[in-house]
Image: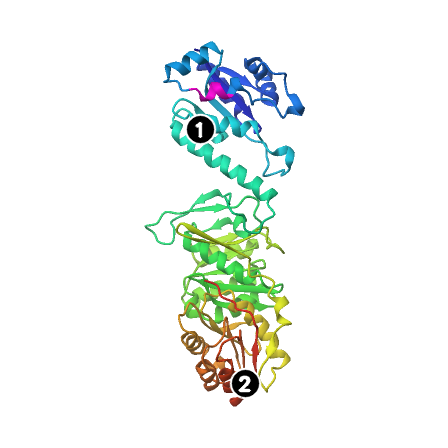
Amino acid sequence: MKKYALVSVYDKEGIVDFAKVLQKLGYVIISTGGTFNALKEAGIKVTPIDEITGNPRDCFDGRMKTISFQIESGILFDRKNPNHIKQAKNLKVPQIDIVVCNLYPFEQKPGIETIDVGGPTMIRAAAKNYKSVRVLVDPRDYKEAFNKSRQELAAKAFYHLSFYDSQIGKYFGTEKFPEELTIPLRKTNVLRYGENPHQSGALYLIPKTNYPLGKLKHLWGRELSGTNIGDISAGLEAVMQFKESAACVIKHMSPCGIATGVDANKALYFAIEADPVSAFGGVIVLNRTMDLAAAKNVATFKNEREENIDIVAVPSVTADALELLKKVRKSMGVYTFGNIPDKRSEKWDLKYFAGAVLLQDFDDNVEKSFKDWEIVTKKKPTAKQLEQMEFGFKCVKAAKSNTVLVVDKNIPMTRGIGSGQTSRIGATRIALEQAKEYDKDGILISDSFFPFEDSVELAAKCGIGAILEQGGSVNDKASIEAADKNGIPMVFTGRRAFRH
């Protein structure tokens, strides 16, 4: 039987050269529509698909071109089954051994008319019959088409179909949490390693995401590891909350220091000063351009404190700032991620566990909750204390729970962060110890309620000026009484701010 190759592609990149290769190898090329015209214009002998199917050309505005008994049978029949071979000859079914197909660009132009039907049908048939049929869905595979195994190409084809269909499902979907769900992901780069050097890792992105990680650009220094990716993301979650200039220094996906300021320079200065010991080997994330003044903070940290920063990730960096950063440390990675969007494009906050995924709402727009806060003590907080509480609540939700932190009494910056603890009193103790003398009149912020009055008593001994916590514990009365006894204003948010 003659050998046939079916070529039907939306993306024409490289297809003429590959078709020439197929022609030299003796394949009869079957093609459709625009692909047929492109190949014919290039001087390649092509058989129009309607000569094989016997159907009228491009019926129903092109919705029916490839779907037919002849085409699908030619792809699917078993080459090792004598009965199949006999039937194929009797029915004049062509032996299609190669299927080259990529799909309408639904990702770029989502809509009814860009939902491909014939293409996925051919791809699925070819992938199912991979022992006899070679299927190619990616122009990048043309050069190695005959070096890659048919099984490898089939696996890629099925992943490609799932990726494609999952976007269509999302387009049509109205349920918040559908019964069945696939999430499209595309590999952007292989990482230096995962969380540890012995773990390999790669970064995947959801198509058309506007999350800044999707626009990471490497300007200088080290390539990213999985740990770096996690830290940059955690830093973004912190600084994205602020309309004013904000900076965060991250270690182990939890902040060492968060601050806002009149510009990036001031914000970064305070974020580093919040906990310079923990900032060693950390990741800096800003929500504003890294200019020369801000870059000098990194240089000072290196030169005067003899401590290093591993990664700088910012929306953009000025040329003079980049030149300075290059001199600070050769291995320090410098990355840009473009402007931070006002609103996320993603529908869900995803958390992956081995074999399971949690889908939930993003914990955004906390400003709306401020109006619902309740002053529960006899002494009322000042306007400045309330302002610092609002800043601190955004900070506490960016840290790993359980978290208690201390915010400076005047400057919008953290002074001590006790995060990732298993006890509330333990988190409180760490935050107060880190704050040192700045706990005097500082603001204590908790991401949940105090189950006992011990944290309030400890805060009072250290001179804390005001407390913000969730409230809602059966022991709220004891905590309120402790605050009243020590003359500390306390406010309940009524909103937990856990981040696991």
* Position of 101 relative to 498 (above/below): above
**Residue closest to the eye, 335 or 152:** 152
**Measured Cα–Cα span from mark 1 to mark 2:** 69 Å
Q: Position of residue 327 (x, y in %)?
A: 46, 57
Examine the rendering and report whether any part of residue 262 can be seen: no
Magenta span main SS: helix
The residue lying at 54 percent from left, 38 percent from top is 165
Disc 1, SS: helix
Q: Amino acid at mark 1?
A: Ala
Q: Residue furthest right?
A: 61
Image coordinates of residue 90 in percent, x first then y, are 46, 9
Front: mark 1 or 2: 1
Q: Earlier in the sequence, mark 1 or mark 2?
A: 1
* Quadrant location of the N terminus in the rendered image: top left
Q: Are marks 1 and 2 in contact (CB under 8 Å)?
A: no
Q: Is residue 74 magenta?
A: yes
> What quarter of the picture does the C terminus occupy?
bottom left
The residue to which callout 1 is attached is 127
- Where 175 falls versus 476 (above or below)? above
Q: Which residues are magenta?
A: 72-77
Residue sitting nearer the eye, 89 or 436: 89
List the single residue furthest toward the bottom: 485
Quarter of the figure with residue 8: top right
Residue bearing the label numbered 2: 488
Residue type of the residue flagged with mark 2: Ile
Report x, y in % for residue 17. 51, 21
